[in-house]
Image: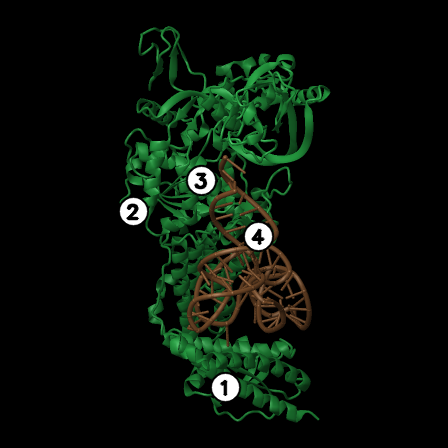
Amino acid sequence: MKKELPKGYEPAQVEQKWFDVWEQRGDFHADETSAKPHYSIVIPPPNVTGVLHMGHALNNTLQDILCRWKRMTGHEVLWMPGTDHAGIATQNVVEKQLAADGKDRHDLGRDEFVQRVWQWREESGGQIINQLKRLGASCDWQRERFTMDEGLSKAVREVFVRLYEDGLIYRANRLINWCPRCHTALSDLEVEHEDKQGNLWHLRYPVKDSEQVLVVATTRPETMLGDTAVAVNPEDERYRELIGKTVLLPLVDREIPIIADDYVDMEFGSGAVKITPAHDFNDFEIGKRHELENINVLDESGVINENGGPYHGQERYQARKNVVADLDAKGLLEKVDDYSNAVGECYRCKTIIEPYMSKQWYVSVGPLAKEAIKAVEGGDTKIVPAQWEKTYYEWMYNIQDWCISRQIWWGHRIPAWYCDDCEAITVAMDDATSCKKCGSSNIRQETDVLDTWFSSALWPFSTMGWPERTETLQKFYPTSCLVTGFDILFFWVARMMMMGLKFMEQVPFKEVYIHALVRDAHGQKMSKSKGNVIDPLTIVDEYGADAFRYTLCAFAAMGRDIKLSTERIGGYRNFVNKLWNASRFALMNLEDFDPSAESLADFELSLADQWILDRFAKTAAEANQALADYKFNDVASTLYSFTWHEFCDWYVELSKQDLYGDDANARRRAQTVLYTVLEGLLRLLHPVLPFVTEEIWQALPGERPCISIMQADYPTGGIATIDPAAVDRMELLMEVIRAIRNIRGELDVPPGKRIAVALDAKSAASVTAINTGQAYIKSLARVEELQVAVGLEHPKQASTQVAGDVEVLIPLAGLINVAEEELRLNKEIAKVEKDVGFFNKKLSNEKFVANAPPQVLEKDRGKLAAAEEKLTILRQSLDKILALKP
RNA sequence: GGGCGGUUAGCUCAGCGGGAGAGCAUUCGCCUCACACGCGAAGGGUCACUGGUUCGAUCCCAGUACCGCCCA
């Protein structure tokens, strides 16, 4: 498959082509009967309504890097994909469609509405799956699951029934968070708190049989319609006389007691608080303590109900205005302050929630949390970075029972039946037809569905076929790793821990890697309303999936948010192109090369060969370590600098001598090394850059050992025996080349001009090294004539630079401006003087010499000696230059 | 109110006990036969502040200031 690669890398067709091949061939499929060690990850299932955003892109790129890496290191990899039915979010989408036709879900009825949602899902749900594929996600797509699948629904029901039977699921009438728009209860986690600028109204409540008024402050004056007490602190001298008396609640003319409770903060406002047990969580607790009545004044849409007297039928904020106006008219409004406080909003529709009395289903999470805490403490599950463990514990220790019922239609309907004859509840695996207690068939099923997060809590085992004891579960559970953002640590990770331990009796994952959130270039959270959203697919179109993946990998440093800028992505696009062009260079020079006919061991490797092979070995080792440690940014930077600054900048240039020269053996040797390093480099890069590496790898000469690069072995270290002394010699040569280039650059010697260079080496070893590598110097530093010897006679007028123990001399002879050379030398001397001063000071410190470890001391002494020698040479050169001046 | 994180080159960020790093941006020189999405060279930082530990602190500890996030 020899072919000419285009001059610039064009990602679009390459990506599409390879993804189709991989998927159709089943390259991502996990085999549960494989004897290889397993590695498994379950995808955090995106909402079926979701469109790919930066968070998904980061999350899935990291998972894909891990999966591809593990696949190449001999593991049987299962990356389990799927989507979440996203109860409220999905129901909202379909309700919006209905609203466009002037209908609501009640016009359709429950069955038809649910049918309609399924239909929506068939037609337009799950587009995010195709978007993930565009990123190159190597999930086992044949196994794609959906939380409302038959199998997963069965798991949900099994879990519900067993928790109920164990007494861990119960019903209770409590205050819950209610979304007046979605018409459903929400768990505490589903409420987002946002600071809002509002008011604090100070209301006057007349004390009965007295001229006195009690002033109470509130941010929600309309709730006064449901007040059932006024509370003061028992220690508060101001009100001691009033405790036990009553006030006459204005507007509704209800008599309510003045009570004493420690909860009341004497410092806040007037020190007297209105108590509305049915509409405030704190008040609810106080109400319980004092056996106060709960008067609910709202209906499920946030409209004042019949308990609100004259305000009946008014929407809550309209009622607020009216209540305030009416109180003001009666002289009962003391004052209004500006006040900002945290307001709870529905996480799905941003409507301000109301604390609302209602009967809901709960999971008693205490016993489950206990196990989940133990599992992390005992190290069965490791959280990376470890700082998140603290957050995890904090939440687990303070966990509240989980409200799992939702008053919507899209979701897993709670498998409980109420008997109209005896009022017993029947909870069963199979749909009940009669009451378990009295046998009556006069029963009806609970209309509520379960919280979406209930089913996702089971994801790691439900997707593998639980409650059956499947082969998949046996092979791949517990999963190896979970990759997720910290925003769903509680929603999802904590609950998977609880459910996994309860039902599988094993942790759901051995490690949890928590990555950062992606923000815009200024650190702002990306949101539609701010208009700062960068669409991942647009990025993929513009820069290619590989470049985008590399960017995310490079940004994914632990413990910090990611500020994404398109400039950076452009930089990695250039990187991919660089790799592409280096490969083009290689392919052009490997046309007559047959890798199966050559072996590295057959050649006497050049200095450059040994150097690059040494660097490759170290790079491979570093990459593996960084991947094992989830240090994705280290992976990216290690591979970047090897590819660009070592392989391209140096080795490719160095190899040209041999590739273009007359020595056929040298050419074959260089071809072998070039091929070997490039081929290995492609494998090293493949987890991050799957598309471009496959494309190039397949274009390399010779036969491939396997059908796709993704099945090839991941390099872990050396591929040839290297003489460390050869590597040192190469590095000296490179230093000499840099020294010559420095002079050329600083003194504006035209790049095309070939010059003469004299090298005065201080050791025979250096002379040998330079003689061996003189072709490199001539080529890379554009040198015409090269002289080298120990104690070489210096040209009369020369520009000087020092490289190791080699004095680099470029004869001035009309080339160089004396004044500029003086300037350059002075600059260099100043630098080295600073070094000498630094080390002198350090080494003359007796305490340092007495206390520092010997290696440090020795190293510093060596550095001082080198710097001093360099300084001497430079000063001598300066003297010579000055002597030239008129 | 409780907790966590951040403050390093103009910008975005690595590093986290032994002479300050990268990418982008900047300056200079180059269309050198893989690549101008490129090549070579260069400039640029009291590592927020104040103390402490140490022979030695950007790095460890304490405090201050300012940003950001999570939970109530």
Determine whether A249 is above or below A394 in the image: above
Residue A341 picture quarter = top right
Sequence-first disc among 3 and 2: 2
Q: Crowdedness of circle 2 by 10 Å Cα count: few (<14), some, many (20+)? A: few
Q: As rendered, which of A539 and A596 lies closer to the eye?
A: A539
**What's the amino acid at mark 3?**
Leu
Q: Crowdedness of circle 1 by 10 Å Cα count: few (<14), some, many (20+)? A: some
Q: Crowdedness of circle 4 by 10 Å Cα count: few (<14), some, many (20+)? A: many
Which color was chain A given?
green
Q: Secondary structure at mark 2?
A: loop
Q: Residue at x 40, y 34 (%)?
A: A495
**What's the amino acid at mark 1?**
Glu
What residue does disc 1 label? A869
Sequence-first disc among 3 and 4: 3
Q: Residue at x 55, y 40 (%)?
A: A53
Q: Locate residue A597, reporting x and y percent.
A: 35, 64
> Spatial distance from mark 2 to mark 1, Cα to Cα?
57 Å
Image-based side of A73 in relation to B13, left or right:
left
